[in-house]
Image (cartoon, helix red, strand yellow):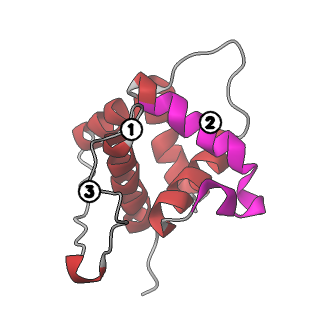
Amino acid sequence: MLNDAQWSELEPLVEACRPKAKTPPQDLQRTLSAIFWRHQNGAKWRAIPEELGPWWRAAQIFIRWSRAGVWERLLGLVQERGIHLGMVFLDGTNVRAHQKAAGAAKRGDLEPSEILVRLLADRVVAMAPRPA
């Protein structure tokens, strides 16, 4: 999903935001592509295509970065650079919730971070070259 041109734009921003660890994440471009793919398609983590790497690595990085506030910082940097994020509209007439979905948010809910990842994924798609 992330081509080399898009990654060259995002890589310095990601490096500025991500938590520094003893060992850096392996193949971060591919892992972020998997995270963006998952949020753009609304699929489960295990449905990530094999060519985007192991599903558990994408899930693990997404959850760790969500708790550390990386997605919020990354979105701020993207907006500071003047990259405008597109808007997404959802027609609620076809959205059905489970009967038990009326309760309060669960502990560890990652909803705000998921929204930020979707915005970033939409921006990556918008950055893709379009045929003339």
Of circles 3 and 1, the one toward us is 1
Any mark on residue 60, and which? Answer: 2
User: Which sits earlier in the primary sequence, circle 3 or circle 1?
Assistant: 3
Q: Amino acid at mark 3?
A: Leu
Which residue range is magenta in the image? 44-66
Q: Amino acid at mark 1?
A: Asp
- The percent position of residue 98, horizontal first and vertical second, equals 37, 66
Q: Residue furthest top?
A: 22
Q: Nearer the viewer, residue 11 or 40?
A: 40
Q: Is residue 60 left or right of residue 131?
A: right
Q: Amino acid at mark 2?
A: Gln
- Residue under pointer 3: 85
Q: Residue at x 27, y 41 (%)?
A: 81
* Separation (CA) of disc 2 from disc 3: 25 Å
Q: Residue furthest bottom?
A: 132
Q: Residue at x 23, y 46 (%)?
A: 82
- The percent position of residue 86, horizontal first and vertical second, equals 25, 63
User: Which sits earlier in the primary sequence, circle 2 or circle 3?
Assistant: 2
Residues under numbered marks 2 and 3 in contact, where contact means CB atoms less than 8 Å apart: no
In which quadrant is the C terminus drawn? bottom left
User: Which sits earlier in the primary sequence, circle 1 or circle 2?
Assistant: 2
Judged from the image, the secondary structure of the residue bearing numbered disc 3 is loop
Of circles 1 and 2, the one toward us is 1
In magenta segment, residue 51: yes
Residue 91 visible in the snapshot: no
Any mark on residue 14, and which? Answer: none
Q: Residue furthest front?
A: 99
Q: From the viewer's perspective, is residue 91 above or below residue 24?
A: below
Any mark on residue 109, and which? Answer: 1
Q: Residue at x 33, y 50 (%)?
A: 115
